Image (cartoon, rainbow, N blue to C red):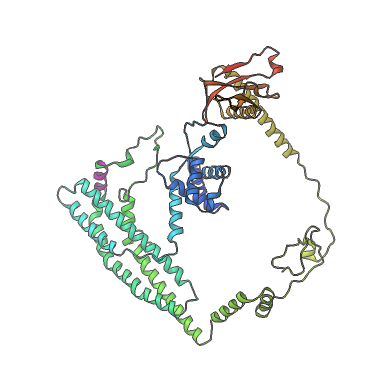
Amino acid sequence: MEASASGAGQDADEEARRRLDAYTYLSAPERLEHLAIMRVFCGTLLADLAVPDVLAKLRQAGGPSAGLDADTLTVRLEQLVKWGNLLRSSHTVKASSISEYQRSRARYQLSKLGERIQRDADGVLAEADAAREVSNELLALVERGLRELAVLVTAPGGIEPQDGLERVSTLFVQFTEFADSIRDFYAYLGQVLARYDLDSTEYQGFKELLLDYVEAITEDVAFRAPRISAALETLWPHIPDLLARLDAHAQGLTGLSPQSDGRLETRVQRSRGRDFADWEGLRGWFSDTDGQGSQVDQLRDATLRALQSLLANAKRMLRSATGEMSRRKDLLRLARWFEEAAPQDAHDIAVAAFGLYGARHLGIPPATDEVVPAYTSWWTGPVVEVPVALRERGSRAQRGRTSAVEDHSAQKQRLREAARERAVARAAAADELRSASDRFAEVRLTSAALGLLLELLATALGNAQLRRHAGTEGKDATEFDLDQASSEDAELGIRLTVRRTAGARCVLHSVDGDLLLDDLELDVGRTSSDTADGDAEVSVS
């Protein structure tokens, strides 16, 4: 039992880390580019986009991300896939060239977690510092909806399921909007009251805000909270039966079939009001159900603290008027002097105001390749590393014995193992191409085999020779001569020859997608030395 609980805890921690990784793109150095890319995907529904599609939309939107090239954009998209904001999408690709195939074979779509985080991030960027009005009128609608629902549920025969579903959904939408507006407004209020630089005009405005607006909110909540609590007490014994009738009428996504181990294939987040926990949260907002106090009590305490902060600001302003405390005007005047002063004058002002004198220079020569002018400030100049012995003890003498030469044998061994594994993988890919050469239409190549084939094909096309043919009207026309276009890897013992044949169609299937080559024939076989031993080449088209 303990092992099972420990495993469940580790799974929960791993899931939490995975979800938190999806926020990484908001703090990465390239966060502006990541934001632009995520906005492109959030502007679509169930759409998978390739690199050229995203590139076109970024250029259409403009901004700093419009100058990204295809390679850089691919790196950004792969990083978003690693963090969990995007998902790979399977898509059959038809391309006219190797480069176009390599750019278009990877398609991406938005993950649910990535869409949620981007939506929240856009909301924070758009209106994080704005003062949000409290939707106080919704509280009256919540009270009315609860009273009407209590009457209908307690009536003989109960409430009609469809009517109950509509009333419950409307009720919780109104309550959620009201509770969110309360939290946002008081967060803004706390940010304002934390300031100690309010002048008389700002103080007057915030005083009216507290005494009028906040007082109206708290009075309305205090007036309606007992009525809402009474309606909930009447409705509470009937909640389980009401939820059961609603589930029987409209199951929604709860009908997803479970797997054999009892877990759901997809976790379902139900609509507000369809779970008993939602009703417990609604009740706990207006009544003290767990001994920790209700949200109404917390709202009353927050209002009291806001008034106390307002009084503290008033006392500070009174002392400032008598010259006892605040140096705000003096500091503003000093800041203006710094803004208008030349660099040398600014240093003199800093010395006079704060006693910050020039740095003491120690006898440590800088790096030989650094030439620092005499007028360079110590604040912006390069830093010279001071030895620990000189910095802590004032001595230049070396202490302790000389450290041994670092042993890199383990790192060298790891590099040799990695090189050996890469060589084995390429050899296996070559064997796979040779074994499947006579039945390419029937097999699906691995990524390594397809990559080796693309490498050989690109080299062969690069080795193609140009020749001139007479055109239909007597003019010369330049065409590729692919009769002798070939490439080989002597180490792997594999050779590829490409010929151009009108009407030929070569399709190669792989786990990364299908590669279609028009008017081309591929001959895959061994190198000339291996062919001499009796291995014949095999042609595929």
Give percent across and percent down for residue 413. Answer: 73, 35
| Placement of the C terminus among the 4 image quadrants | top right
Residue extending furthest toward the top:
534
Q: Is residue 424 left or right of residue 329?
A: right
Can residue 276 be seen at all in this image of the molecule? yes
Q: Is residue 293 visible?
A: no
Q: From the viewer's perspective, is residue 457 above or below residue 403? A: above
Give the left or right position of residue 130, taking residue 327 as reference: left
Q: Where 191 falls versus 325 (above or below)?
A: above
Examine the structure image and report whether residue 243 is included in the region drawn in magenta.
yes
Q: Main secondary structure of the magenta part?
A: helix
Q: Farthest front residue?
A: 474
Front residue of 56/360: it is 56
Point out residue 69 in the picture as x, y percentages from the top left corner.
57, 45
| Location of residue 126 with respect to 437 vertically, above or below | below
Residue at 67 percent across and 29 percent down: it is 423
Outermost residue toward the right in this view: 397
Q: Residue at point 47% right, 49% down?
A: 60
Instruction: Let me know if residue 477 is in the magenta part.
Output: no
**Picture quadrant of residue 343:** bottom right
Q: Position of residue 295 (x, y in %)?
A: 36, 63
Q: Is residue 405 above or below residue 220?
A: above
Magenta range: 241-248
Q: Residue at x 30, y 57 (%)?
A: 174
In this view, the residue in front, 269 or 260, is 269
